[in-house]
Amino acid sequence: MPVVGEEEVSRISTTIFSNPCSDRLTLRYSYQEPTDLVITGYDIQGRRVFDHSRRGLSGSGSFSVVLTGIPEGVYLLKIQEGEAQRIEKLIYLR
């Protein structure tokens, strides 16, 4: 029996590690097709405190985002990969 109206589910393929982190956040990714990645950090009051983006990532790899100029605390990271997005909590300690 054919399935009608089923949408393809986008799969998030980025892992964030060292959490809690002290000076940098490392992201590991794996994409089969070129993908734009945007990471936006928000403080607990909802203010945007940092942005980082990479365009056309493909294959597997990793990169670091240096976190300077923000106070210690809990942040929410909005991670957008193409059309997919998710929110993760980040604890930043110096």
Image (cartoon, grey):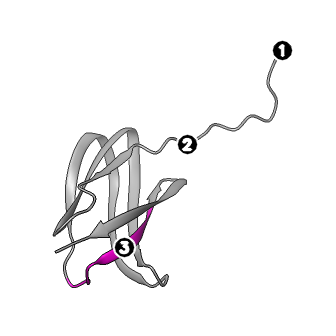
Residue 90 sits above or below residue 81 on the image: below
> Residue shown at 49%/53% (left/top)?
82
Q: Pick whichever, 32 or 23, lies toward us.
A: 23
Q: For the point 17% across and 68% down, which residue is it?
A: 22
Q: How far, Cα to Cα, is label 3 from label 2?
A: 27 Å
Mark before the other along the chain sequence, 3 or 2: 2
Specify the amino acid type for callout 2: Ser
Label pair 2/1, CB-CB below 8 angstroms: no
Residue denoted by label 1: 1
- Tell me, for residue 74, which label it has, or none: 3
Q: Residue at x 38, y 72 (%)?
A: 75
Quick check: is 74 in the magenta stretch? yes
Position of residue 9 measured from the top left corner of the image (x, y, whole percent): 60, 39
Look at the image and say whether residue 43 sits in the magenta stretch: no
Q: Where residue 17 sits: x, y (%)?
A: 26, 52
Residue 78 falls in image quadrant? bottom left
Q: Nearer the viewer, mark 3 or mark 1?
A: 3
Q: Is residue 66 left or right of residue 84?
A: left
Closest to the observer, 39 or 35: 39
Badge 2: residue crowd in 10 Å (few <14, some 14–19, many ≥20):
few
Residue type beneath disc 3: Val
Q: Earlier in the sequence, mark 2 or mark 1?
A: 1
Query: In the rendering, at what x and y percent does residue 70 appear?
Result: 26, 83
**How many residues crowd around disc 3 within 10 Å: few (fewer than 14), some, or many (20 or more)?**
some
Label 2 sits on a secondary structure element that is loop
Q: Main secondary structure of the magenta part?
A: strand
Q: In this picture, which residue range is highlighted in magenta?
A: 69-78
The residue that label 2 is drawn on is: 10
Amino acid type, label 1:
Met
The CA span between labels 2 and 1 is 24 Å
Q: Are marks 3 and 2 in contact (CB under 8 Å)?
A: no
Q: Position of residue 68 (x, y in %)?
A: 19, 79
